[in-house]
Image: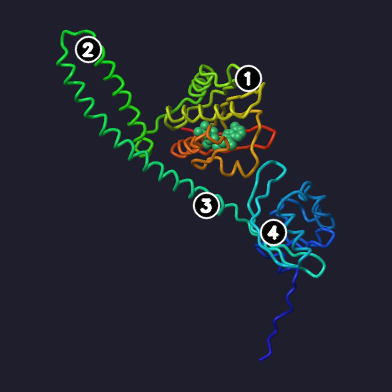
Amino acid sequence: MATSLGPIDPVGVMEALMEGLQIIDRQWRYRYLNAAACRHGRMSKEALVGRTMMECYPGIEATPLFGLLTECMATRAPATFENRFTFADGSDAWFELRIGPWHDGLVVLSIDITERKRLDAALRASYQLRALGQMAAGVAHDLGNLLNPIALELARLRRRVQGDPEAIAAVERASGVVARGAETITRLRDYARPTERAAAPVVLDAVAREAASLVRASAPWAPTRKVTLVEELGAPPPAPGHGPDLLAALVNLLINAVDAVGHDGQVAIRTGASDDAVWVAVEDDGVGMPPEVVARAHEPYFTTKGEAGTGLGLAMVHAAVVRAAGTMDIRSAVGAGTTVTLRFPRA
Ligand SMILES: Nc1ncnc2c1ncn2[C@@H]1O[C@H](COP(=O)(O)OP(=O)(O)OP(=O)(O)O)[C@@H](O)[C@H]1O
Ligand SMILES: [Mg+2]
């Protein structure tokens, strides 16, 4: 039976693909890009076609991706690669790239996997945090079992030493220590069962000011370095959350910032509001982080400080922010400092 199907226009098909498709010649010139590839590269077809990769993305020669492309160009063997691409504005995205030979160069297929990567990282962090929470619950339980009999014995002793002021004072000091231990256990238990904590409106400016004064008082830079800590508070409306959690989070961020700046560094804590969110940001002009450190910074136990760091600081900050329905955003570049911004919905 004869059919009257018309011819298919191959370029129209390539334009319709959800995957990005680019053809690069042996001189590294873009010869063709479909609409998805231009979207992935955030550049127009006109800005790319006919120009080389190096002209369009200065510095690309130094990337592992370019190393792989060079190898494929030489060997004519196909390859796949997961690439994190940082755009000129500092934002980034993940792409799965499938590179294949074309008679006069390479064909590259790109799939946007940013969302999958983000979910993978969130899932990994939440598993690690759950394990950490379970460990914290176990430790809290065992410590509680140790402290309870001590508290009972102290109460009994307190009755036996009536009339001996020195002994009474000693028993009271010991009881005070036990009470502080019990508070620590409660905090550990809260960490393990964070959702049971009630959210109340938090005044960001007050918490930011308190965090700054705590860090100033402990002056972790003294006496060898001079670090200026400035506050620029924008009186945003209250955020729903847990004050002590947020205070601990900001202290962690400030200490990271102080760790990162050199001899004459500056650290700033800022607050403000937009239409639907309130935010607090800690900014430093310190060493900054390469993208692979930014990507992993909030993972529990991830640290670049060796023995000096636990790698739990940003994990705790992140957990506290998520509990308050907020988000944590890290902007950083090597040598250009770091800004960590916590955003919360308006209460
Ligand atoms: N402001 C910053 N500037 C540069 N790097 C940072 C900054 N904040 C965090 N980092 C990087 O992220 C890593 C993880 O930070 P995190 O606070 O979780 O742990 P840590 O600071 O290493 O250890 P701890 O918080 O226990 O002292 C750090 O080791 C560092 O490499
Ligand atoms: Mg830290």
User: Element at badge 3?
Assistant: helix
User: Element at badge 4?
Assistant: helix
Q: What residue type is labelled 2?
A: Ile
Q: What residue type is labelled 4?
A: Ala
Question: How many labels were placed on the picture?
Answer: 4
User: Depth-wise, is mark 3 or mark 1 nearer the camera?
Assistant: 1
Return the residue at label 4. 36
Q: Quadrant of ligand 1?
A: top right
Q: Which amino acid does label 1 sit on?
A: Arg
Residue 204 visible in the snapshot: yes
Return the residue at label 3. 120
User: Depth-wise, is mark 2 or mark 3 nearer the camera?
Assistant: 2
In the depicted view, which residue is nearer to us: 151 or 116? Answer: 151
Q: How far apart are marks 3 and 4 (CA)?
A: 24 Å
Q: Choose top left, top right, bottom left or bottom right for residue 104.
A: bottom right
**Nearest to N terminus: mark 2 or mark 3:** 3
